[in-house]
Image (cartoon, rainbow, N blue to C red):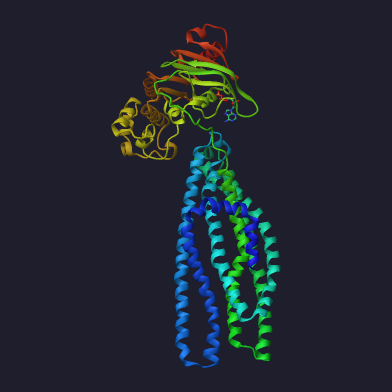
Amino acid sequence: MKKSSKNIVWSKRGLLSRLFLENGLQHWKKYAIAFFFMFLVAATTSLSAWIMRDVINEIFIERDQDKIFSVAAAVFVIFLIKGAATYGQIVILAKVGNRIVANLQKRLFDHMLNQRIDFYEQFTIGDLATRFSHNAQAAREAINLFVISIGRDLLSVIGLTCVMIVQNPEMSLVALFVAPPAILGVTILIRRIKAIARAEFASLTKIVTIVQESSIGARVVKSFGLEPIMRKEMHHAVTSVQERADSMARITAATSPLMEVLGGIAISLVILYAGWQVVGDGADPGAFFSFITALLLAYEPAKRLARLNVNLQAHLVGVDIMYKLLDLPPAILENSDAKTLEPEQASVVLKNVSFSYGEATTLKGLSLEAPKGKTTALVGPSGGGKSTIFSLIERFYDPIEGQVLISGVDIKTVTFESLRNSIAYVSQNPFLFDGSVKHNIWLGRTGATMDEIIEAAKAANAHDFIESLPEGYETRVGEDGAMLSGGQRQRIAIARAMLRDAPILLLDEATAALDAESEAYITGAIERLKEGRTTLVIAHRLSTIRHAALIHVIKEGKVVQSGTHDALVSQEGLYQQLHRLQFSNSSI
Ligand code: ADP
Protein backbone atom coordinates (compact mmCIF):
# COMPACT_ATOMS: atom_id res chain seq x y z
CA MET A 1 0.00 0.00 0.00
CA LYS A 2 2.90 2.31 0.60
CA LYS A 3 3.80 2.01 -3.03
CA SER A 4 0.51 3.41 -4.23
CA SER A 5 1.16 6.70 -2.47
CA LYS A 6 4.60 6.91 -4.03
CA ASN A 7 2.92 6.56 -7.36
CA ILE A 8 1.02 9.83 -6.77
CA VAL A 9 4.15 11.80 -6.17
CA TRP A 10 5.53 10.79 -9.53
CA SER A 11 2.42 10.91 -11.67
CA LYS A 12 1.43 14.49 -10.86
CA ARG A 13 4.73 15.65 -9.55
CA GLY A 14 4.90 18.83 -11.64
CA LEU A 15 1.65 20.33 -10.48
CA LEU A 16 1.97 19.15 -6.90
CA SER A 17 5.51 20.36 -6.45
CA ARG A 18 4.56 23.70 -7.97
CA LEU A 19 1.70 23.97 -5.50
CA PHE A 20 4.07 23.26 -2.63
CA LEU A 21 6.84 25.50 -3.85
CA GLU A 22 4.57 28.45 -4.46
CA ASN A 23 2.18 28.02 -1.57
CA GLY A 24 3.42 25.48 0.91
CA LEU A 25 7.07 26.40 1.30
CA GLN A 26 6.44 29.72 3.02
CA HIS A 27 4.46 27.87 5.71
CA TRP A 28 7.14 25.25 6.33
CA LYS A 29 7.34 26.01 10.06
CA LYS A 30 3.65 25.35 10.51
CA TYR A 31 3.90 22.21 8.39
CA ALA A 32 6.82 21.06 10.55
CA ILE A 33 4.66 21.41 13.66
CA ALA A 34 1.76 19.66 11.91
CA PHE A 35 4.12 16.85 10.91
CA PHE A 36 5.28 16.56 14.49
CA PHE A 37 1.67 16.14 15.61
CA MET A 38 1.05 13.65 12.83
CA PHE A 39 4.13 11.74 13.91
CA LEU A 40 2.65 11.60 17.41
CA VAL A 41 -0.62 10.27 16.00
CA ALA A 42 1.21 7.58 14.02
CA ALA A 43 3.43 6.68 16.97
CA THR A 44 0.56 6.43 19.45
CA THR A 45 -1.47 4.36 16.96
CA SER A 46 1.44 1.96 16.58
CA LEU A 47 1.98 1.89 20.34
CA SER A 48 -1.65 0.99 20.92
CA ALA A 49 -1.12 -2.09 18.72
CA TRP A 50 2.21 -2.86 20.37
CA ILE A 51 0.75 -2.79 23.85
CA MET A 52 -1.77 -5.53 22.94
CA ARG A 53 0.99 -8.06 23.42
CA ASP A 54 1.34 -7.07 27.11
CA VAL A 55 -2.43 -6.95 27.53
CA ILE A 56 -2.77 -10.55 26.35
CA ASN A 57 0.42 -12.10 27.69
CA GLU A 58 0.82 -10.32 31.04
CA ILE A 59 -2.80 -9.89 32.05
CA PHE A 60 -4.78 -12.70 30.45
CA ILE A 61 -2.21 -15.45 30.26
CA GLU A 62 0.26 -14.69 33.08
CA ARG A 63 -2.58 -13.19 35.23
CA ASP A 64 -0.10 -10.61 36.60
CA GLN A 65 -2.20 -8.31 38.83
CA ASP A 66 0.54 -5.67 39.19
CA LYS A 67 0.50 -5.04 35.46
CA ILE A 68 -3.25 -4.35 35.20
CA PHE A 69 -2.99 -0.79 36.47
CA SER A 70 0.17 0.17 34.58
CA VAL A 71 -1.08 -1.23 31.25
CA ALA A 72 -4.48 0.49 31.62
CA ALA A 73 -2.75 3.78 32.51
CA ALA A 74 -0.41 3.43 29.53
CA VAL A 75 -3.37 2.85 27.18
CA PHE A 76 -5.10 5.94 28.59
CA VAL A 77 -2.00 8.13 28.15
CA ILE A 78 -1.49 6.84 24.60
CA PHE A 79 -5.01 7.83 23.59
CA LEU A 80 -4.78 11.17 25.41
CA ILE A 81 -1.69 12.08 23.42
CA LYS A 82 -3.27 10.83 20.23
CA GLY A 83 -6.38 13.00 20.80
CA ALA A 84 -4.39 16.15 21.54
CA ALA A 85 -2.04 15.58 18.58
CA THR A 86 -4.97 15.01 16.20
CA TYR A 87 -6.55 18.28 17.35
CA GLY A 88 -3.32 20.21 16.83
CA GLN A 89 -2.76 18.72 13.40
CA ILE A 90 -6.29 19.47 12.16
CA VAL A 91 -6.28 23.07 13.37
CA ILE A 92 -2.85 23.89 11.97
CA LEU A 93 -3.54 22.37 8.57
CA ALA A 94 -6.92 24.06 8.31
CA LYS A 95 -5.41 27.46 9.08
CA VAL A 96 -2.56 27.06 6.63
CA GLY A 97 -5.02 25.81 4.00
CA ASN A 98 -7.29 28.81 4.48
CA ARG A 99 -4.35 31.15 4.16
CA ILE A 100 -3.26 29.42 0.96
CA VAL A 101 -6.72 29.88 -0.55
CA ALA A 102 -6.77 33.54 0.47
CA ASN A 103 -3.32 34.15 -1.04
CA LEU A 104 -4.24 32.40 -4.26
CA GLN A 105 -7.41 34.43 -4.59
CA LYS A 106 -5.47 37.65 -4.07
CA ARG A 107 -2.91 36.55 -6.65
CA LEU A 108 -5.60 35.60 -9.14
CA PHE A 109 -7.28 38.96 -8.71
CA ASP A 110 -4.06 40.95 -9.05
CA HIS A 111 -3.27 38.98 -12.15
CA MET A 112 -6.72 39.65 -13.54
CA LEU A 113 -6.38 43.39 -12.95
CA ASN A 114 -3.11 43.38 -14.89
CA GLN A 115 -4.59 41.73 -17.95
CA ARG A 116 -5.33 43.46 -21.19
CA ILE A 117 -8.85 44.61 -21.85
CA ASP A 118 -9.49 41.72 -24.26
CA PHE A 119 -8.89 39.27 -21.40
CA TYR A 120 -12.41 40.15 -20.25
CA GLU A 121 -13.76 39.17 -23.64
CA GLN A 122 -12.03 35.78 -23.50
CA PHE A 123 -13.30 34.75 -20.09
CA THR A 124 -16.90 34.84 -19.00
CA ILE A 125 -17.70 35.98 -15.47
CA GLY A 126 -18.85 32.42 -14.80
CA ASP A 127 -15.49 31.04 -15.79
CA LEU A 128 -13.59 33.55 -13.66
CA ALA A 129 -15.87 33.12 -10.65
CA THR A 130 -15.45 29.34 -10.80
CA ARG A 131 -11.67 29.63 -10.99
CA PHE A 132 -11.68 32.02 -8.05
CA SER A 133 -13.84 29.96 -5.75
CA HIS A 134 -13.90 26.32 -6.78
CA ASN A 135 -10.37 26.02 -8.18
CA ALA A 136 -8.63 28.02 -5.44
CA GLN A 137 -10.31 25.75 -2.87
CA ALA A 138 -9.11 22.75 -4.88
CA ALA A 139 -5.53 23.87 -4.24
CA ARG A 140 -6.10 23.75 -0.49
CA GLU A 141 -7.82 20.38 -0.71
CA ALA A 142 -4.99 18.94 -2.79
CA ILE A 143 -2.27 20.20 -0.44
CA ASN A 144 -4.06 19.15 2.73
CA LEU A 145 -4.99 15.77 1.36
CA PHE A 146 -1.42 15.14 0.38
CA VAL A 147 0.07 16.37 3.65
CA ILE A 148 -2.37 14.42 5.82
CA SER A 149 -1.96 11.27 3.78
CA ILE A 150 1.79 11.40 3.84
CA GLY A 151 2.10 12.73 7.37
CA ARG A 152 -0.52 10.80 9.27
CA ASP A 153 -1.56 7.84 7.13
CA LEU A 154 1.78 6.90 5.66
CA LEU A 155 3.59 7.29 9.02
CA SER A 156 0.86 5.23 10.70
CA VAL A 157 1.12 2.50 8.08
CA ILE A 158 4.92 2.49 8.43
CA GLY A 159 4.72 2.38 12.23
CA LEU A 160 2.13 -0.38 12.23
CA THR A 161 4.04 -2.34 9.59
CA CYS A 162 7.10 -2.19 11.87
CA VAL A 163 4.96 -3.55 14.71
CA MET A 164 3.75 -6.36 12.43
CA ILE A 165 7.25 -7.21 11.22
CA VAL A 166 8.67 -7.27 14.74
CA GLN A 167 5.79 -9.36 16.05
CA ASN A 168 5.74 -11.79 13.15
CA PRO A 169 7.78 -11.26 9.97
CA GLU A 170 6.26 -14.17 7.98
CA MET A 171 2.69 -13.06 8.53
CA SER A 172 3.68 -9.53 7.36
CA LEU A 173 4.61 -11.00 4.01
CA VAL A 174 1.19 -12.62 3.74
CA ALA A 175 -0.53 -9.30 4.47
CA LEU A 176 1.47 -7.42 1.84
CA PHE A 177 0.38 -9.79 -0.93
CA VAL A 178 -2.62 -7.59 -1.61
CA ALA A 179 -0.65 -4.45 -2.52
CA PRO A 180 -0.11 -5.07 -6.29
CA PRO A 181 -3.80 -5.69 -7.19
CA ALA A 182 -4.77 -2.61 -5.15
CA ILE A 183 -2.38 -0.37 -7.11
CA LEU A 184 -3.67 -1.71 -10.42
CA GLY A 185 -7.31 -1.14 -9.51
CA VAL A 186 -6.68 2.42 -8.38
CA THR A 187 -4.77 3.33 -11.55
CA ILE A 188 -7.77 2.38 -13.69
CA LEU A 189 -10.12 4.49 -11.58
CA ILE A 190 -7.84 7.55 -11.80
CA ARG A 191 -8.09 7.82 -15.56
CA ARG A 192 -11.84 8.12 -15.37
CA ILE A 193 -11.86 10.63 -12.55
CA LYS A 194 -9.69 13.12 -14.48
CA ALA A 195 -12.04 13.26 -17.46
CA ILE A 196 -15.04 13.79 -15.22
CA ALA A 197 -13.41 16.56 -13.18
CA ARG A 198 -12.68 18.58 -16.33
CA ALA A 199 -16.21 18.25 -17.60
CA GLU A 200 -17.49 19.28 -14.19
CA PHE A 201 -15.62 22.58 -14.39
CA ALA A 202 -17.30 23.39 -17.72
CA SER A 203 -20.76 22.77 -16.28
CA LEU A 204 -20.07 24.76 -13.10
CA THR A 205 -18.95 27.68 -15.24
CA LYS A 206 -22.11 27.43 -17.29
CA ILE A 207 -24.26 27.64 -14.16
CA VAL A 208 -22.61 30.87 -12.98
CA THR A 209 -22.85 32.35 -16.48
CA ILE A 210 -26.57 31.62 -16.79
CA VAL A 211 -27.31 33.08 -13.34
CA GLN A 212 -25.33 36.17 -14.25
CA GLU A 213 -26.94 36.64 -17.65
CA SER A 214 -30.44 36.08 -16.30
CA SER A 215 -29.82 38.69 -13.65
CA ILE A 216 -28.04 41.33 -15.76
CA GLY A 217 -30.30 40.70 -18.72
CA ALA A 218 -33.45 40.40 -16.58
CA ARG A 219 -35.29 42.99 -18.67
CA VAL A 220 -34.56 41.26 -21.95
CA VAL A 221 -35.36 37.86 -20.47
CA LYS A 222 -38.72 39.08 -19.21
CA SER A 223 -39.78 41.18 -22.15
CA PHE A 224 -38.87 38.53 -24.71
CA GLY A 225 -40.34 35.75 -22.56
CA LEU A 226 -37.02 33.91 -22.50
CA GLU A 227 -37.66 32.29 -19.11
CA PRO A 228 -38.33 28.79 -20.55
CA ILE A 229 -35.08 28.91 -22.55
CA MET A 230 -33.03 30.13 -19.58
CA ARG A 231 -34.70 27.53 -17.38
CA LYS A 232 -33.91 24.79 -19.87
CA GLU A 233 -30.27 25.82 -20.15
CA MET A 234 -29.95 26.00 -16.37
CA HIS A 235 -31.60 22.62 -15.84
CA HIS A 236 -29.29 21.13 -18.40
CA ALA A 237 -26.17 22.58 -16.72
CA VAL A 238 -27.33 21.68 -13.22
CA THR A 239 -28.22 18.16 -14.27
CA SER A 240 -24.88 17.60 -15.89
CA VAL A 241 -23.06 18.80 -12.76
CA GLN A 242 -25.27 16.47 -10.74
CA GLU A 243 -24.56 13.53 -13.04
CA ARG A 244 -20.83 14.22 -12.98
CA ALA A 245 -20.88 14.47 -9.19
CA ASP A 246 -22.71 11.11 -9.12
CA SER A 247 -20.12 9.49 -11.40
CA MET A 248 -17.34 10.98 -9.33
CA ALA A 249 -18.89 9.59 -6.14
CA ARG A 250 -19.32 6.19 -7.81
CA ILE A 251 -15.72 6.03 -8.91
CA THR A 252 -14.33 7.31 -5.60
CA ALA A 253 -16.56 4.84 -3.75
CA ALA A 254 -15.42 2.02 -6.04
CA THR A 255 -12.13 2.08 -4.16
CA SER A 256 -14.01 0.87 -1.06
CA PRO A 257 -15.24 -2.54 -2.33
CA LEU A 258 -11.84 -3.01 -3.94
CA MET A 259 -10.04 -2.34 -0.68
CA GLU A 260 -12.59 -4.17 1.49
CA VAL A 261 -12.28 -7.34 -0.56
CA LEU A 262 -8.50 -7.17 -0.68
CA GLY A 263 -8.40 -6.31 3.04
CA GLY A 264 -10.74 -9.20 3.82
CA ILE A 265 -8.49 -11.58 1.91
CA ALA A 266 -5.40 -10.33 3.75
CA ILE A 267 -6.98 -10.54 7.19
CA SER A 268 -8.49 -14.02 6.57
CA LEU A 269 -5.16 -15.31 5.35
CA VAL A 270 -3.44 -13.93 8.45
CA ILE A 271 -6.04 -15.47 10.77
CA LEU A 272 -5.70 -18.85 9.04
CA TYR A 273 -1.94 -18.79 9.18
CA ALA A 274 -1.63 -17.35 12.69
CA GLY A 275 -4.43 -19.50 14.13
CA TRP A 276 -2.71 -22.56 12.84
CA GLN A 277 0.61 -21.38 14.32
CA VAL A 278 -0.86 -20.51 17.73
CA VAL A 279 -3.25 -23.46 18.08
CA GLY A 280 -1.10 -26.08 16.33
CA ASP A 281 2.44 -25.02 17.11
CA GLY A 282 1.83 -23.12 20.38
CA ALA A 283 3.12 -19.75 19.14
CA ASP A 284 2.93 -16.62 21.35
CA PRO A 285 -0.77 -15.49 21.46
CA GLY A 286 0.21 -11.95 22.64
CA ALA A 287 2.32 -11.45 19.54
CA PHE A 288 -0.55 -12.71 17.41
CA PHE A 289 -3.01 -10.25 18.97
CA SER A 290 -0.59 -7.42 18.64
CA PHE A 291 -0.07 -8.33 14.99
CA ILE A 292 -3.79 -8.56 14.23
CA THR A 293 -4.44 -5.22 15.99
CA ALA A 294 -1.69 -3.55 13.96
CA LEU A 295 -3.08 -5.04 10.78
CA LEU A 296 -6.62 -3.88 11.54
CA LEU A 297 -5.40 -0.41 12.52
CA ALA A 298 -3.27 -0.18 9.37
CA TYR A 299 -6.23 -1.09 7.25
CA GLU A 300 -8.02 2.32 7.39
CA PRO A 301 -4.98 4.55 6.72
CA ALA A 302 -3.87 2.15 4.01
CA LYS A 303 -7.31 2.43 2.41
CA ARG A 304 -7.09 6.21 2.54
CA LEU A 305 -3.64 6.09 0.97
CA ALA A 306 -4.95 3.93 -1.84
CA ARG A 307 -7.80 6.37 -2.39
CA LEU A 308 -5.47 9.36 -2.15
CA ASN A 309 -4.48 9.28 -5.78
CA VAL A 310 -8.10 9.15 -6.92
CA ASN A 311 -9.17 12.06 -4.72
CA LEU A 312 -6.03 14.02 -5.47
CA GLN A 313 -6.60 13.83 -9.22
CA ALA A 314 -10.02 15.43 -8.94
CA HIS A 315 -8.53 18.36 -7.02
CA LEU A 316 -5.48 18.64 -9.26
CA VAL A 317 -7.67 19.08 -12.31
CA GLY A 318 -9.07 22.18 -10.59
CA VAL A 319 -5.58 23.38 -9.68
CA ASP A 320 -4.49 22.91 -13.28
CA ILE A 321 -7.40 25.06 -14.52
CA MET A 322 -6.52 27.75 -11.98
CA TYR A 323 -2.87 27.78 -13.04
CA LYS A 324 -3.89 28.18 -16.68
CA LEU A 325 -5.29 31.56 -15.67
CA LEU A 326 -2.32 32.51 -13.49
CA ASP A 327 0.10 31.57 -16.26
CA LEU A 328 -1.38 33.89 -18.85
CA PRO A 329 1.25 36.49 -19.69
CA PRO A 330 0.55 39.86 -18.07
CA ALA A 331 -0.75 42.74 -20.11
CA ILE A 332 1.30 45.33 -21.94
CA LEU A 333 4.23 46.09 -19.69
CA GLU A 334 5.45 49.48 -18.64
CA ASN A 335 8.94 50.45 -19.79
CA SER A 336 11.46 50.04 -17.02
CA ASP A 337 12.54 53.67 -17.51
CA ALA A 338 8.98 55.01 -17.94
CA LYS A 339 8.58 58.73 -17.25
CA THR A 340 5.76 60.56 -15.58
CA LEU A 341 3.44 62.27 -17.99
CA GLU A 342 2.92 65.81 -16.76
CA PRO A 343 -0.79 66.42 -16.25
CA GLU A 344 -0.75 69.75 -18.04
CA GLN A 345 0.56 68.14 -21.22
CA ALA A 346 -2.55 67.66 -23.22
CA SER A 347 -2.69 67.65 -27.00
CA VAL A 348 -3.39 64.22 -28.47
CA VAL A 349 -1.89 63.07 -31.75
CA LEU A 350 -2.10 59.73 -33.57
CA LYS A 351 0.67 59.41 -36.14
CA ASN A 352 0.40 56.79 -38.90
CA VAL A 353 -1.25 54.36 -36.55
CA SER A 354 -2.07 50.85 -37.73
CA PHE A 355 -3.80 48.39 -35.48
CA SER A 356 -5.51 45.04 -35.69
CA TYR A 357 -7.40 42.95 -33.13
CA GLY A 358 -6.74 39.79 -35.08
CA GLU A 359 -6.72 39.12 -38.78
CA ALA A 360 -8.46 42.20 -40.18
CA THR A 361 -6.72 45.55 -39.96
CA THR A 362 -8.88 47.94 -37.94
CA LEU A 363 -6.80 51.13 -38.26
CA LYS A 364 -4.79 51.65 -41.43
CA GLY A 365 -2.05 54.23 -41.05
CA LEU A 366 -4.42 56.64 -39.35
CA SER A 367 -3.25 60.11 -38.35
CA LEU A 368 -5.25 62.67 -36.44
CA GLU A 369 -4.84 65.52 -34.01
CA ALA A 370 -6.84 66.77 -31.06
CA PRO A 371 -5.61 70.25 -30.16
CA LYS A 372 -4.93 71.23 -26.58
CA GLY A 373 -7.90 72.50 -24.58
CA LYS A 374 -10.36 72.18 -27.45
CA THR A 375 -13.09 69.75 -28.47
CA THR A 376 -12.37 67.34 -31.28
CA ALA A 377 -15.14 65.11 -32.59
CA LEU A 378 -14.87 61.71 -34.21
CA VAL A 379 -17.76 60.82 -36.47
CA GLY A 380 -18.43 58.19 -39.09
CA PRO A 381 -20.14 54.92 -39.74
CA SER A 382 -20.27 52.27 -37.03
CA GLY A 383 -17.32 49.88 -37.08
CA GLY A 384 -15.02 52.54 -38.56
CA GLY A 385 -12.59 52.42 -35.62
CA LYS A 386 -13.61 55.31 -33.35
CA SER A 387 -13.76 53.28 -30.12
CA THR A 388 -10.50 51.60 -31.07
CA ILE A 389 -8.86 55.04 -31.22
CA PHE A 390 -10.00 55.63 -27.61
CA SER A 391 -8.59 52.26 -26.56
CA LEU A 392 -5.22 53.15 -28.07
CA ILE A 393 -5.15 56.57 -26.38
CA GLU A 394 -5.79 54.83 -23.04
CA ARG A 395 -3.13 52.28 -24.02
CA PHE A 396 -5.37 49.28 -23.59
CA TYR A 397 -3.54 48.10 -26.69
CA ASP A 398 -0.35 49.16 -28.44
CA PRO A 399 -0.46 50.05 -32.13
CA ILE A 400 1.26 47.69 -34.56
CA GLU A 401 2.77 50.68 -36.32
CA GLY A 402 2.88 54.39 -35.62
CA GLN A 403 2.66 56.34 -32.39
CA VAL A 404 0.17 57.83 -30.01
CA LEU A 405 1.54 61.09 -28.64
CA ILE A 406 0.28 63.22 -25.81
CA SER A 407 1.80 66.69 -26.15
CA GLY A 408 4.56 65.20 -28.23
CA VAL A 409 5.40 62.37 -25.80
CA ASP A 410 4.95 58.79 -27.02
CA ILE A 411 2.62 57.18 -24.49
CA LYS A 412 4.69 53.99 -24.62
CA THR A 413 7.40 55.84 -22.70
CA VAL A 414 5.28 57.00 -19.77
CA THR A 415 4.01 55.25 -16.67
CA PHE A 416 0.54 53.74 -16.74
CA GLU A 417 -0.39 55.62 -13.62
CA SER A 418 0.45 59.04 -15.02
CA LEU A 419 -1.17 58.22 -18.37
CA ARG A 420 -4.42 57.08 -16.81
CA ASN A 421 -4.38 60.02 -14.40
CA SER A 422 -4.29 62.32 -17.39
CA ILE A 423 -7.42 60.84 -18.91
CA ALA A 424 -11.06 60.74 -17.85
CA TYR A 425 -13.38 58.52 -19.85
CA VAL A 426 -17.11 59.12 -19.81
CA SER A 427 -19.26 56.68 -21.64
CA GLN A 428 -22.85 57.70 -21.98
CA ASN A 429 -23.85 54.31 -20.79
CA PRO A 430 -21.71 54.49 -17.69
CA PHE A 431 -20.90 51.72 -15.28
CA LEU A 432 -21.62 52.26 -11.60
CA PHE A 433 -20.27 50.09 -8.79
CA ASP A 434 -22.58 48.56 -6.22
CA GLY A 435 -21.97 51.06 -3.41
CA SER A 436 -23.14 54.51 -2.32
CA VAL A 437 -23.48 57.51 -4.62
CA LYS A 438 -20.63 59.09 -2.70
CA HIS A 439 -18.40 56.08 -3.25
CA ASN A 440 -19.12 56.10 -6.97
CA ILE A 441 -18.09 59.73 -7.34
CA TRP A 442 -15.11 59.35 -4.99
CA LEU A 443 -13.67 56.64 -7.25
CA GLY A 444 -12.87 59.43 -9.72
CA ARG A 445 -10.11 60.57 -7.34
CA THR A 446 -9.64 58.43 -4.26
CA GLY A 447 -8.55 60.79 -1.53
CA ALA A 448 -11.07 63.51 -2.41
CA THR A 449 -12.86 65.16 0.52
CA MET A 450 -16.64 65.26 0.95
CA ASP A 451 -16.65 68.95 0.00
CA GLU A 452 -14.87 68.16 -3.25
CA ILE A 453 -17.34 65.36 -3.97
CA ILE A 454 -20.27 67.73 -3.45
CA GLU A 455 -18.64 70.39 -5.58
CA ALA A 456 -18.16 67.88 -8.41
CA ALA A 457 -21.77 66.72 -8.08
CA LYS A 458 -23.00 70.31 -8.25
CA ALA A 459 -20.99 70.96 -11.40
CA ALA A 460 -22.47 67.79 -12.90
CA ASN A 461 -26.04 68.94 -12.15
CA ALA A 462 -26.34 65.95 -9.87
CA HIS A 463 -26.32 67.47 -6.37
CA ASP A 464 -30.06 68.26 -6.21
CA PHE A 465 -31.30 64.84 -7.21
CA ILE A 466 -28.71 63.15 -4.96
CA GLU A 467 -29.98 65.21 -1.99
CA SER A 468 -33.52 64.06 -2.72
CA LEU A 469 -32.54 60.35 -2.62
CA PRO A 470 -33.62 58.54 0.58
CA GLU A 471 -30.16 58.63 2.15
CA GLY A 472 -28.62 61.41 0.08
CA TYR A 473 -25.00 60.74 -0.80
CA GLU A 474 -25.05 57.52 1.23
CA THR A 475 -27.82 55.96 -0.89
CA ARG A 476 -26.75 52.67 -2.43
CA VAL A 477 -27.07 52.65 -6.19
CA GLY A 478 -27.58 48.88 -6.61
CA GLU A 479 -25.76 46.68 -9.08
CA ASP A 480 -24.66 48.85 -12.00
CA GLY A 481 -26.77 51.71 -10.62
CA ALA A 482 -30.03 49.79 -11.03
CA MET A 483 -31.83 52.11 -8.58
CA LEU A 484 -31.20 55.19 -10.71
CA SER A 485 -32.52 56.45 -14.02
CA GLY A 486 -30.29 56.53 -17.09
CA GLY A 487 -29.92 60.31 -16.83
CA GLN A 488 -29.02 60.12 -13.12
CA ARG A 489 -26.39 57.44 -13.71
CA GLN A 490 -24.97 59.60 -16.41
CA ARG A 491 -24.66 62.64 -14.16
CA ILE A 492 -22.95 60.61 -11.44
CA ALA A 493 -20.45 59.43 -14.04
CA ILE A 494 -19.89 63.05 -15.09
CA ALA A 495 -19.35 64.05 -11.45
CA ARG A 496 -16.79 61.24 -11.18
CA ALA A 497 -14.93 62.59 -14.21
CA MET A 498 -15.26 66.12 -12.85
CA LEU A 499 -13.56 65.05 -9.63
CA ARG A 500 -10.83 63.30 -11.58
CA ASP A 501 -10.00 66.67 -13.14
CA ALA A 502 -7.88 65.12 -15.88
CA PRO A 503 -6.61 67.30 -18.73
CA ILE A 504 -7.88 64.88 -21.39
CA LEU A 505 -11.50 63.87 -21.64
CA LEU A 506 -12.72 60.97 -23.75
CA LEU A 507 -16.44 61.17 -24.28
CA ASP A 508 -18.50 58.47 -25.89
CA GLU A 509 -21.86 59.89 -26.78
CA ALA A 510 -24.95 57.75 -26.25
CA THR A 511 -26.79 56.54 -29.31
CA ALA A 512 -30.12 56.50 -27.51
CA ALA A 513 -31.76 59.82 -26.84
CA LEU A 514 -32.69 60.77 -23.27
CA ASP A 515 -35.81 62.69 -22.31
CA ALA A 516 -35.60 66.42 -22.90
CA GLU A 517 -35.12 67.38 -19.25
CA SER A 518 -32.32 64.88 -18.61
CA GLU A 519 -30.75 65.84 -21.88
CA ALA A 520 -30.65 69.49 -20.87
CA TYR A 521 -29.09 68.68 -17.50
CA ILE A 522 -26.52 66.39 -19.05
CA THR A 523 -25.60 68.71 -21.87
CA GLY A 524 -25.03 71.49 -19.33
CA ALA A 525 -22.91 69.21 -17.17
CA ILE A 526 -20.83 68.02 -20.09
CA GLU A 527 -20.23 71.55 -21.31
CA ARG A 528 -18.87 72.40 -17.87
CA LEU A 529 -16.76 69.22 -17.83
CA LYS A 530 -15.25 70.04 -21.22
CA GLU A 531 -14.13 73.51 -20.18
CA GLY A 532 -10.37 73.87 -20.54
CA ARG A 533 -9.85 70.18 -21.33
CA THR A 534 -8.66 68.47 -24.48
CA THR A 535 -11.83 66.62 -25.33
CA LEU A 536 -12.28 63.84 -27.85
CA VAL A 537 -15.89 62.97 -28.42
CA ILE A 538 -17.35 60.10 -30.39
CA ALA A 539 -20.48 61.73 -31.71
CA HIS A 540 -23.52 60.02 -33.14
CA ARG A 541 -25.66 63.11 -33.50
CA LEU A 542 -24.03 65.83 -35.53
CA SER A 543 -26.12 68.48 -33.78
CA THR A 544 -23.99 68.04 -30.64
CA ILE A 545 -20.69 68.83 -32.37
CA ARG A 546 -21.63 71.88 -34.35
CA HIS A 547 -19.21 73.94 -32.25
CA ALA A 548 -16.35 71.44 -32.09
CA ALA A 549 -13.00 72.97 -32.96
CA LEU A 550 -12.18 70.08 -35.24
CA ILE A 551 -14.10 67.15 -36.66
CA HIS A 552 -12.48 64.00 -38.03
CA VAL A 553 -14.60 61.75 -40.20
CA ILE A 554 -13.46 58.14 -39.72
CA LYS A 555 -14.29 55.39 -42.14
CA GLU A 556 -12.79 51.91 -42.42
CA GLY A 557 -9.86 52.73 -40.20
CA LYS A 558 -8.85 55.98 -41.90
CA VAL A 559 -9.54 59.68 -41.51
CA VAL A 560 -11.39 60.57 -44.69
CA GLN A 561 -12.17 64.22 -43.87
CA SER A 562 -11.16 66.79 -41.26
CA GLY A 563 -12.32 70.31 -40.53
CA THR A 564 -14.94 72.38 -38.72
CA HIS A 565 -18.64 71.70 -39.09
CA ASP A 566 -19.16 74.68 -41.37
CA ALA A 567 -16.27 73.73 -43.60
CA LEU A 568 -17.25 70.06 -43.83
CA VAL A 569 -20.91 70.73 -44.46
CA SER A 570 -20.06 72.82 -47.48
CA GLN A 571 -17.68 70.18 -48.88
CA GLU A 572 -18.83 67.23 -50.87
CA GLY A 573 -18.14 64.07 -48.97
CA LEU A 574 -19.19 61.66 -46.24
CA TYR A 575 -19.84 64.37 -43.65
CA GLN A 576 -22.24 66.16 -45.96
CA GLN A 577 -24.05 62.88 -46.63
CA LEU A 578 -24.29 62.08 -42.90
CA HIS A 579 -25.52 65.57 -42.23
CA ARG A 580 -28.16 65.38 -44.94
CA LEU A 581 -29.29 62.00 -43.62
CA GLN A 582 -29.67 63.22 -40.03
CA PHE A 583 -31.24 66.47 -41.12
CA SER A 584 -33.89 64.66 -43.17
CA ASN A 585 -34.53 62.21 -40.27
CA SER A 586 -34.92 64.94 -37.70
CA SER A 587 -37.30 66.85 -39.91
CA ILE A 588 -39.75 63.92 -40.16
P1 ADP B 1 -16.62 52.30 -34.02
O1 ADP B 1 -16.36 52.77 -32.63
O2 ADP B 1 -16.28 53.29 -35.07
O3 ADP B 1 -18.01 51.77 -34.21
P2 ADP B 1 -14.82 50.16 -33.34
O4 ADP B 1 -13.52 50.78 -33.02
O5 ADP B 1 -15.70 49.73 -32.22
O6 ADP B 1 -15.63 51.10 -34.34
O7 ADP B 1 -14.57 48.88 -34.25
C1 ADP B 1 -13.72 48.86 -35.39
C2 ADP B 1 -13.58 47.44 -35.88
O8 ADP B 1 -12.88 46.66 -34.96
C3 ADP B 1 -14.92 46.74 -36.13
O9 ADP B 1 -14.80 45.98 -37.32
C4 ADP B 1 -15.08 45.83 -34.94
O10 ADP B 1 -15.76 44.68 -35.30
C5 ADP B 1 -13.63 45.53 -34.58
N1 ADP B 1 -13.47 45.35 -33.12
C6 ADP B 1 -13.76 46.26 -32.17
N2 ADP B 1 -13.46 45.79 -30.94
C7 ADP B 1 -12.95 44.55 -31.12
C8 ADP B 1 -12.44 43.55 -30.25
N3 ADP B 1 -12.37 43.74 -28.93
N4 ADP B 1 -12.00 42.40 -30.79
C9 ADP B 1 -12.04 42.22 -32.13
N5 ADP B 1 -12.50 43.12 -33.01
C10 ADP B 1 -12.96 44.27 -32.52
Q: Position of residue 578 (x, y in %)?
A: 55, 14
Q: Position of residue 552 (x, y in %)?
A: 52, 15
Q: Is residue 238 visible?
A: no
Judge by depth and name the residue closer to the eye, 552 or 484: 552
Task: Residue at 48% x, 10% y: name it.
Answer: 564
Give the side of residue 227 with respect to residue 474, left or right. Answer: right
Judge by depth and name the residue closer to the eye, 489 or 309: 309
Find the residue positioned furthest to the left.
451
Q: Where in the image, quadrant-wise, is ligand 1 located?
A: top right
Quadrant for the N terminus in the image: bottom right
Q: Position of residue 168 (x, y in %)?
A: 63, 81
* Location of residue 231 with respect to 342 vertically, above or below: below
Q: Position of residue 34 (x, y in %)?
A: 48, 63
Where residue 73 sits, quadrant-wise, is bottom left
Find the residue positioned furthest to the top.
570
* Location of residue 356 with respect to 143 vertically, above or below: above
Q: Is residue 112 visible?
A: yes
Give the side of residue 2 with respect to residue 510, left or right. Answer: right
Task: Residue at 44% x, 70% y: name it.
Answer: 84
